[in-house]
Image: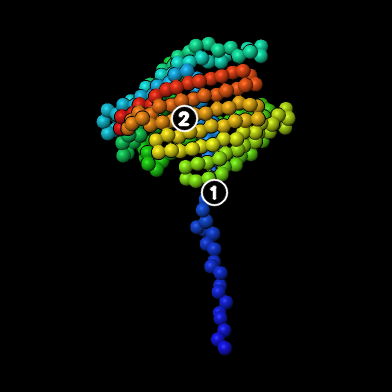
Amino acid sequence: MATREAVKPEKTDYMKLPCPVPYEEINREAFMSLNAEYFEGMRVDFTKRLNQRFSLSHSITMGPTEIPCQSTETIKIPTAHYDFGADFMDPKLMLRGRVMTDGRVDAALTSEPQTSRGMFNIDYKIANTGNVALSYVQKVSEKVSLVSDLMYNHISRDVIASFGYDYILRQCRVRGKIDSNGCTSAFVEESLNEGLKFVLSAELDHKKKDYRFGFGFTVGEY
């Protein structure tokens, strides 16, 4: 009788194992779905490409801004901001700059925009915040994701749970969430045509009786 030779298991090449995501990117997918760019009032973003290397951007926001106060009621004042940006893209050099009306100035420089990227973060803490966060993402399909997270503070003993969804359509993306405090949010991005996008934002906080609505447009020429 013929005997079968034992099949030897393939040897694992530990030098070719996939690299895990960085620690700060672990909950990025859940954060993007649950924390969209909610805003109140009106927002308009415009990008103009002057040539293949140089482009300008303009951003205008108008709406109320909360100010700190000792009372439990929320105090808002009307504000308006304008941001101006300029980008220079070259195969050997990339320059980016932003100027805001509130006095902030941001700038970035790199010699290899496709492969080189740098970032510096400095964190200083006088006490521990006591926060512990857990998040879970379920990919229902390529276009639908269900997300949940749990935030616990062992100092104040506060617990907040959030449940959200991220639905990508052909010309629209809808994100929303609801948390254990009764706050409901929704964020819609719809492409009207090439280079024009309509944005709608809404937040309903029934516990604080605070309701926020915003709309805007994103215009870009590429």
Residue 192 as seen in the image, left or right of residue 133: left
Marks 1 and 2, how far apart at CA = 31 Å
> x, y percentage for residue 159?
69, 31
Quadrant of the frame with the N terminus: bottom right
Kindly identify the residue that appears in the image at 39 percent across and 24 percent down.
217
Quadrant of the frame with the C terminus: top left
Question: Looking at numbered disc 1 in the image, what kind of residue is underneath it?
Answer: Pro
Q: Secondary structure at mark 1?
A: loop
Q: Which residue is mark 2?
A: 188
Residue 206 got which mark? none
Query: Can I make out residue 31 in this image?
Result: no
Residue 75 drawn above or below residue 176: above
Task: Estimate how packed mark 2 is, as few (under 14), some (14 to 19) or many (20 or more) residues with alpha carbons within 10 Å.
Answer: some
State which tag comes first along the sequence, 1 or 2: 1
Residue 216 as seen in the image, left or right of residue 195: right
> x, y percentage for residue 120?
50, 34
Kindly identify the residue that appears in the image at 31 percent across and 29 percent down.
221
> x, y percentage for residue 90?
31, 36
Residue 130 as seen in the image, left or right of residue 148: right
> x, y percentage for residue 13?
52, 62
Residue 20 got which mark? 1
Q: Residue 25 is drawn in which quadrant?
A: top right
Q: Give the mark count.
A: 2
Q: Secondary structure at mark 2?
A: strand
Kindly identify the residue that appears in the image at 51 percent across and 37 percent down.
166
Residue 194 drawn above or below residue 58: below
Q: Residue 47 is drawn in which quadrant?
A: top left
